[in-house]
Amino acid sequence: MSGFPYLTQAVRDLAWTCFSPGLLHSWQLADEGQNVTDCGLFLTPARRRWLAQLDNEPRVLLEALTQKPVKRLGLYFEQLWHFFLEQDPDTTLIAHNLAVRDQGRTLGEFDVIYWCHSRQRHFHLELAVKFYLGWRQHTSFELASQWREWLGPSSQDRLDLKLEQLLRRQIRLSAQPQARELLAELGVGTPAREIAIKGYLFQSLIDPLPPPFGYNPQCPLQHWIPVDKLATQLPELQTDRYLLLAKLRWLSPAQATDEDEILNRTELVERLQSLLASNPRSRLVAGVSAAGLELCRFFVTPGDWPAGAKVDHLKEKT
């Protein structure tokens, strides 16, 4: 599994967060005339050099992260974006998590407003990092699955709900009069609209769904396995060394450290059966090489996953 060749976890996560291929193509998902694009900040030679230098001396990044420690993956993802936009000479971070209010009522929040020097304009950038498991409900023989068939690991989040929120509400915030007034106070006119959706899609090993419309094929599909099928399905992944990933290690491809416990197949099955018996929560696992580099990743779900997911009014958890 290809990744970024940096030794420091935070630097790998930074590179993945800002420069890995988007999970979905925003321009394909937006309504005609909506003028929404994928983020136009790319991994240039200058940025490669900056990341390499940061890997050699990561103190400034690590200090920035420890100033405001977080436990939620989405907040960590946002922190990495803010650091990049503050450090990069081609961008100026104008504001982030900027709430728009009307008489005490919050209308929405801009994830990021930044100025791009090379493109000479302001941008409203919405950010999302998501992990969705495909669960067949409606697709039969179609070439693309439906967005509502991709569920979060807890089954309380759905791709269609997230896209509805992103494309119908969040990215349109600058059209609100109160938002335009707030942006004008910051010296921002009408910003261009960008979305950066990063993450992974996981297929069932026994009933794989085709990817949904808008999926970026540069992002390899991964797998999910129910814990009660783990012993029989693991050999299909053709790796026999495994690393359980804590949530803040879900971003970039894993590199095992000396402190990590590498499990064989039997140990992994026993460990996950025990963990999910006491706490029925989906766990992310990396299959790693002898050198400790990630070869694949997969979710192990409770045996009855997705319990209750047939209910169409699932609410998204942020």
Image (cartoon, rainbow, N blue to C red):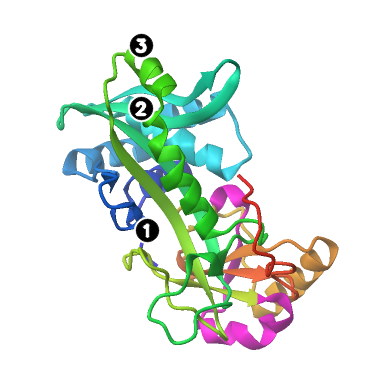
Q: Is residue 297 left or right of 283 when viewed as pictured? A: left
> For the residue marked with disc 1, what is the amino acid?
Leu
Q: Is residue 24 left or right of 71 when viewed as pictured? A: left
**Dot placed on the residue nearer the N-terminal end, 3 or 2:** 2
Q: Which residue is mark 1?
A: 24
Q: Which residue is mark 3?
A: 185
Magenta-highlighted residues: 226-249
Q: Is residue 256 visible to the viewer in this orientation of the structure?
A: no
> For the residue marked with disc 3, what is the amino acid?
Glu
Say the numbered circle drawn on residue 242. Answer: none
Towards the viewer: 279 or 98: 98
The image shows residue 139 at horizontal and vertical percentages of 50, 80
> For the residue marked with disc 2, what is the amino acid?
Ile
Dot 3 alpha-carbon crowd within 10 angstroms: few under 14, some 14 to 19, many 20 or more: few
Q: Quadrant of residue 66?
A: top right
Q: Residue furthest top?
A: 185
Q: Which residue is mark 2?
A: 113
**220 in the magenta segment:** no
**Is label 3 or label 1 in front?**
3
